[in-house]
Amino acid sequence: MVRSLQPGQDWVWCYVDEVTLKREDGGWVEVDLFFEAGIGYMREHVESGGGPSVGEDHIHGKGFPLGRWVAEMRRRHAAGELDVDQTAQIEALPDWRWES
């Protein structure tokens, strides 16, 4: 297993099962790594003065496709594919809008 050392990210990657996992309630649950990484990077982006509405080609830091993440989260929300917790985390971002 490999563990993320990024602040605010607490996931691990299991090479055997090829899944991303997170400790929860004393056990391991599968998580959406793209969501987890993206919400962490978006929080970082907002804390440094950026806004949540970025162009689809926006790259954060050393290469995370933050603009693509925003577009994908909007698509997933419209399709009903985000769970309640994911929706709440995104909506907690200052000035977040589901429409571009």
Image: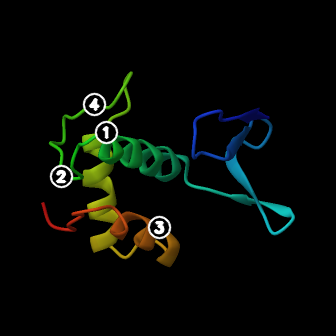
In this rendering, position of residue 95 left or right of residue 12: left
User: What amino acid is at disc 3?
Assistant: Gln
Which quarter of the figure has residue 78?
Answer: bottom left
In the image, what residue type sits under mark 4?
A: Ile
Dividing the picture into quadrants, the one containing residue 6 is: top right
Closer to the camera: disc 1 or disc 4? 1
Q: Mark 3 points at which residue?
A: 86
As shown in the figure, which amino acid type bears the numbered disc 2? Ser
Label of residue 69 in the image: none
Label 2, label 4: how many angstroms apart (C-alpha)? Answer: 13 Å
Q: Crowdedness of circle 3 by 10 Å Cα count: few (<14), some, many (20+)?
A: some
Q: What element carries label 3?
A: helix
Q: Which residue is drawn at 22% across and 35% down?
A: 58
Mark 1–mark 4 Cα distance, whole angstroms, equals 15 Å
The C terminus lies in quadrant: bottom left
Q: Residue furthest top?
A: 62
Counting from the top left corner in percent of width and height, residue 32 is at 55, 54
Q: Name the residue under label 2.
A: 53
Amino acid residing under circle 1:
Ser
Tag 4 residue: 59
Please tell me which residue is depicted at 28% across the width and 30% down the height of the picture.
59
Q: Distance between the residues labelled 2 and 3?
A: 17 Å
- Reading the image, the residue beneath label 1 is 48
Tag 4 secondary structure = loop
Q: In which quarter of the image is residue 22?
A: bottom right
Q: Which of marks 2 and 1 is nearer the N terminus?
A: 1
Give the mark, 3 or 4, whose residue is nearer the N terminus.
4
